[in-house]
C-alpha cells in the first residue's frame, strides 16, 4: 500500500509541474491536479518445470566405474564441486568407489568425500564414515565431520564410535563426541556421556552435560562448571550414575521438543 501511495504521489507531482509549465506560471501558483493511474498487480509466478536429472539407481557399468575412479582425484582443486556433483548424479551405486576417497593422502579429498556422501544421503557409506571417525591418525576436523554426517545418515549405528571418540586424547574429538551424541536417540550413548562430565576440558564436560539434559530431561540442580571443583564434578557423575542404574531398564529417550516448545513444569 505504501508503494502505491508513493507512485500516486509522484505521478501527481509530475502532472502538477507539467501543468504549471504549460500555462507559463510559476510552479508555486500552478493549480493542483491530482491523478491516479489504476494499479495492476504483477503477474503471478508460473510453475517452473523440474528439469533436474534424477540420480542414477542402476548398477554402474565398467565404464562408469572407471569414470567414478577418475573423479576421485578431482575432489580437490578447481573442479571439486563439479566432481562432487558427478558423484551425486552417479548415485548410490557409486558409493563403493567414493568411499575410497576416505583413505586417499589428501585431507581435502577425504573431507570432500564425506561432504559428497552427505549430499547423496549415502546411507551405505556410513560404515566407512565410522571407520574414518575412529581413526586416531586422522585430522580432528575430518573425524568430526565423518561422525556428524554418519549421525545424520544413520544415527543408530554410531554409539560405538561415539564411545571410542569420547576417550580420545584430542579434546576437540572428545568434544565432538559429547556434542553430537545429543542427536543420537539411542540409550547406549548415555553411559558414554556420564563419565565425560568430569573431563578436564570445560567445553567437553559442558557439552556432555547439555547432551545428557537434552536426551534424558532428567532434572538436576544446575551444574556450574566454572565455580565447581573436581570433587563437585565427581559428585555430579555419582548422581547421574545412581539415576541411570535405577532407570536404565525402563528409560526411553523422550520425543524431541519442537522448535519454540516450552518445557512443562
Image (cartoon, grey):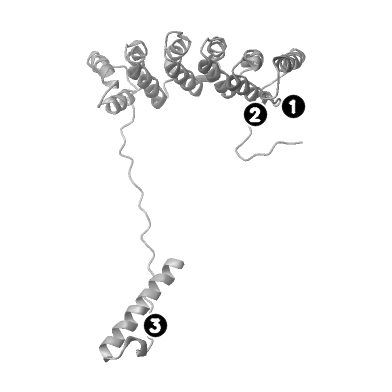
Return the disc, 3 or 1, that comes first in the chain's sequence: 3
Q: Position of residue 152 (x, y in %)?
A: 49, 24
| Neighbourhood count class around disc 3 (C-alpha, 10 Å): few under 14, some 14–19, many 20 upward | few
Q: Residue at x 75, y 12 (%)?
A: 245
Label 2 to label 3: alpha-carbon separation = 62 Å
Q: Residue at x 53, y 15 (%)?
A: 171
Which residue is most to the left?
63
Query: Of 75 and 221, which appears nearest the observer?
Result: 221
Q: Position of residue 26 (x, y in %)?
A: 31, 89
Label 2 to label 1: alpha-carbon separation = 16 Å
Mark 3, residue position: 34
| Neighbourhood count class around disc 1 (C-alpha, 10 Å): few under 14, some 14–19, many 20 upward | few
Query: Can residue 38 be spotted in the picture?
Result: no
- Position of 220 compared to 36: left or right? right
Quadrant assignment, res 81:
top left
Q: Which mark is residue 255?
A: 2
Q: Nearer the viewer, mark 2 or mark 1?
A: 1
- Position of 166 compared to 87: left or right? right
Return the disc, 2 or 1, that comes first in the chain's sequence: 1
Q: Position of residue 262 (x, y in %)?
A: 68, 39
Element assignment for label 3 = loop
Element assignment for label 2 = loop
Element assignment for label 1 = loop
The C terminus appears in which quarter of the rendering?
Answer: top right
- Position of 46 compared to 174: left or right? left
Mark 1, residue position: 219
Amino acid at each position: 500500500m505504501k508503494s502505491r501511495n508513493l507512485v500516486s504521489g509522484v505521478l501527481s507531482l509530475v502532472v502538477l509541474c507539467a501543468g504549471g509549465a504549460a500555462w507559463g506560471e510559476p510552479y508555486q501558483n500552478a493549480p493542483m491536479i491530482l491523478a491516479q493511474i489504476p494499479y495492476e498487480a504483477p503477474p503471478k509466478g508460473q510453475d517452473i518445470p523440474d528439469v533436474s536429472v534424477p540420480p542414477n539407481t542402476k548398477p554402474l557399468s565398467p565404464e562408469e566405474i572407471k569414470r567414478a575412479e577418475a573423479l576421485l582425484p578431482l575432489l580437490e582443486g578447481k573442479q571439486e564441486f563439479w566432481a562432487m556433483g558427478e558423484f551425486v548424479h552417479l548415485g548410490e551405486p557409486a558409493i563403493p568407489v567414493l568411499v575410497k576417497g576416505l583413505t586417499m593422502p589428501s585431507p581435502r579429498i577425504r573431507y570432500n568425500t564425506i561432504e559428497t556422501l552427505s549430499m547423496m544421503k549415502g546411507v551405505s557409506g556410513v560404515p566407512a564414515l565410522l571407520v574414518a571417525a575412529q581413526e586416531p591418525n586422522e585430522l580432528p576436523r575430518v573425524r568430526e565431520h565423518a561422525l556428524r554426517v554418519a549421525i545424520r545418515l544413520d544415527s543408530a549405528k554410531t554409539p560405538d564410535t561415539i564411545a571410542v571418540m569420547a576417550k580420545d586424547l584430542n579434546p576437540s574429538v572428545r568434544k565432538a563426541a559429547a556434542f553430537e551424541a545429543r542427536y543420537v536417540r539411542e540409550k547406549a550413548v548415555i553411559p558414554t556421556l556420564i563419565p565425560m562430565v568430569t573431563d578436564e576440558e570445560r567445553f567437553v564436560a559442558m557439552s556432555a552435560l547439555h547432551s545428557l539434559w537434552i536426551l534424558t530431561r532428567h532434572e538436576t540442580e544446575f551444574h556450574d562448571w566454572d565455580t565447581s571443583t573436581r570433587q563437585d564434578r565427581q559428585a555430579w557423575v555419582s548422581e547421574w550414575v545412581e539415576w541411570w542404574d535405577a532407570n536404565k531398564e525402563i528409560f526411553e529417550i523422550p520425543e524431541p521438543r519442537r522448535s519454540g516448545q516450552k518445557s512443562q513444569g
